[in-house]
Image: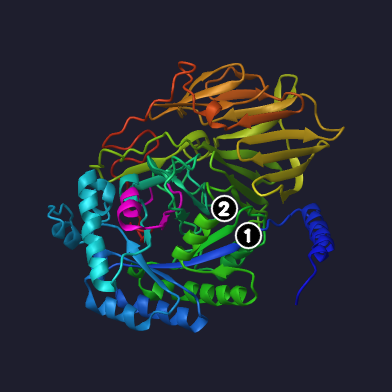
């Protein structure tokens, strides 16, 4: 049907009116698409247990064909040299499927590159053996050359997509520059799980990385690598973050179908899909489904079968797009010149408790607002800076653990202990001290344009608490005539923890992490240390507190004003926020455990 051009105006007005009504109901709906990648990656050996590695691939192909779901198959080198796996893929996968690279390192690949194998098994999950950053940069290139030559021999062309739990910048830069890889994926945020830490990055969705740090979103188009990196596994936005506080590694609460709670539990799956697809997301919502073959079919069958059927139904209702990683990468590059702002909004708890969690991320910072009943805090706040180089840009890892991170302003996981939880909280000043600024009811969340999010909640004492998340600023304010006048924020952390705070000036907090200086600008708010080693007070100014993350303000060294930020000390061992060198292995596989 053809419409007149001016017929859009009343339709637009109706849409805006409906959006306003939804916002008043507490769940304003952003216009970004809901995108799902089904990514199944394939190993050729499994030294940890006797498991049939072919059966999961056969069953996954059958499910995908049954539901007409495009799938991305990422293949490890040892699977590339297994004729039974390759013949199965060539014979059975769907016409809309994609085959890409899974770039963990294995013995035949290393030896084909003329390098001595140091592993305990043909595939060794220790990061200094099984991942590229365990090798000098020139050896990484040789390993990728060997992989790409074999892939082209098998499939007649080079892959456009590549994935790994960890991808270092030199390898990702080389894959793009030399072989044209244009989309990538890496692991969710985790601390110590499987012996490696990725912490403080884009919580979900995707980002353009800095050329100096594959985990760090770039701020400018000139300094970024134009390969969008999508975050894998689908983390529980409420409970994943706090898993394992006080221990050396986190548990796993993700969409992976082998986990309960998580992707093996239909009730949790329903909640997770609703959270991702029916809440504001700004640029787009993203979910990675699928499972690696080394878990075996029996462990994944129930959860994966349920997920595929649900995804197909939502696709048929035109509520979501199910596409390959390569297609999502192309859409991202065609749509965004730099990393867009995005959000994950969980206004319900999968357990039925009164917990809420709201993630906002732009190319300048990420923040998490969380509620536990009537108590709220800024649980996490990390700054992004494209000049902060990763540890493995020039040197390689020699131990079984590794760390990728961004710049912490508030790290509610690493700066906490059981019963002593870090955060930035609202307080009302009273005689003899301060009292928590409590809320009541459910937060209301609205997108405010293409890249901003507004979160508001009634205060128990009257008035309302309001957060506005913009790409370079985070504002906290109280509104309403009955709202308290004398209030502020308090940043606290567990006793005996040592955040990288180096100084507090009148309007800013200075940090130095891994040798890199940066600051949290607090605008007109007065900042001071309380008579405590683990508390900083930030007073409201004209009814609000505004944090600025503009690169000119947040990246300057605080020890010597005006001095350019120093590069982090790069070396062969992880930095400050790491797990012990020999973490206890999980009793069940968790990604690569």
Position in image of residue 329 (x %, y %): 47, 59
Left or right? Give the position of 356 relative to 418. right
Tell me which residue sits at (50%, 55%) in the image: 333
Q: Nearer the viewer, residue 128 or 263?
A: 128
Position in image of residue 44 (x %, y %): 26, 69
- Which residue is label 2 attached to? 237
Position in image of residue 437 (x %, y %): 72, 34
- Contact between marks 1 and 2 (CB within 8 A): the answer is yes
Q: Quadrant of residue 279?
A: bottom right
First along the sequence among labels 1 and 2: 2
Could you tell me which secondary element the residue under label 1 belongs to? Answer: helix
Tell me which residue sits at (41%, 34%) in the image: 388
Left or right? Give the position of 90 relative to 107. right
Above or below residue 210? Residue 545 is: above
Above or below residue 197? Residue 522 is: above
Could you tell me which secondary element the residue under label 2 belongs to? Answer: loop
Above or below residue 77? Residue 446 is: above
Q: Quadrant of residue 62?
A: bottom left
Q: Which residues are magenta?
A: 173-194
Tell me which residue sits at (26%, 62%) in the image: 148
- Which residue is label 1 attached to? 275
Position in image of residue 232 (x %, y %): 45, 58
């Amino acid at each position: 049907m053809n419409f007149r051009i001016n017929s859009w105006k009343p339709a637009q007005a109706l849409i805006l009116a409906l959006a306003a009504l939804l916002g008043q109901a507490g769940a304003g709906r952003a216009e970004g698409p809901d995108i799902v990648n089904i990514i199944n990656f394939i190993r050729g050996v499994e030294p940890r247990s006797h498991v049939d590695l072919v059966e999961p691939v056969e069953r996954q192909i059958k499910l995908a064909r049954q539901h007409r779901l495009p799938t991305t198959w990422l293949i490890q080198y040892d699977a590339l040299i297994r004729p039974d796996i390759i013949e199965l893929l060539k014979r059975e996968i769907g016409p809309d499927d994609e085959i890409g690279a899974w770039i963990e390192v294995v013995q035949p690949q290393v030896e084909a590159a003329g390098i001595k194998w140091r592993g305990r098994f043909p595939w060794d999950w220790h990061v200094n053996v099984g991942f590229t950053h365990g090798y000098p940069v020139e050896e990484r290139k040789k390993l990728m050359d060997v992989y790409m030559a074999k892939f082209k021999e098998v499939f007649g062309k080079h892959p456009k997509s590549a994935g790994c739990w960890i991808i270092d910048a030199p390898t990702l830069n080389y894959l793009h520059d030399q072989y044209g890889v244009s989309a990538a994926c890496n692991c969710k945020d985790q601390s110590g799980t499987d012996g490696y830490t990725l912490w403080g990055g884009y919580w979900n969705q995707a980002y353009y990385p800095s050329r100096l740090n594959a985990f760090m979103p770039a701020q400018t188009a000139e300094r970024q690598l134009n390969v969008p990196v999508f975050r894998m596994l689908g983390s529980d936005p409420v409970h994943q973050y706090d898993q394992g506080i006080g221990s050396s590694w986190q548990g796993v609460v993700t969409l992976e179908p082998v986990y309960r709670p998580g992707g093996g539990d239909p009730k949790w799956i329903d909640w997770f899909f609703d959270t991702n697809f029916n809440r504001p997301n700004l640029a787009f919502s993203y979910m990675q489904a699928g499972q690696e073959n080394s878990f075996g079919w029996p462990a994944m069958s129930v959860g994966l079968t349920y997920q595929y059927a649900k995804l197909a139904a939502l696709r048929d209702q035109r509520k979501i797009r199910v596409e390959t990683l390569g297609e999502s990468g192309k859409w991202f590059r065609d749509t965004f010149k730099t990393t867009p702002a995005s959000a994950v909004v969980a206004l319900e708890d999968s357990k039925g408790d009164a917990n809420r969690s709201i993630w906002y991320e732009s190319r300048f910072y990420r923040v998490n607002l969380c509620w536990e009943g009537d108590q709220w805090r800024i649980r996490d706040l990390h700054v992004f800076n494209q000049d902060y180089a990763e540890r493995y840009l020039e040197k390689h890892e020699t131990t079984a653990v590794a760390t990728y991170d961004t710049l912490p302003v508030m790290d509610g996981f690493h700066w906490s202990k059981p019963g002593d939880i870090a955060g930035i909280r609202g307080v009302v000043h009273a005689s003899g001290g301060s009292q928590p600024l409590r809320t009541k009811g459910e937060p209301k969340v609205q997108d405010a344009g293409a890249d901003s999010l507004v979160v508001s909640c009634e205060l128990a004492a009257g008035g309302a608490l309001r957060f506005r998340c913009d790409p370079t600023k985070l504002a906290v304010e109280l509104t309403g005539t009955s709202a308290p006048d004398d209030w502020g924020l308090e940043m606290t952390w567990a006793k005996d923890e040592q955040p990288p705070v180096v100084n507090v000036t009148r309007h800013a907090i200075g940090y130095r992490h891994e040798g890199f200086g940066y600051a949290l600008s607090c605008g007109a708010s007065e900042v001071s240390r309380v008579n405590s080693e683990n508390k900083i007070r930030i007073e409201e100014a004209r009814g609000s507190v505004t944090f600025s993350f503009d690169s000119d303000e947040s990246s300057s060294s605080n020890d010597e004003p005006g001095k350019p930020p120093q590069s982090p000390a790069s070396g062969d061992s992880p930095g400050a926020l790491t797990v012990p060198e020999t973490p206890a292995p999980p009793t069940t596989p968790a990604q690569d455990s």
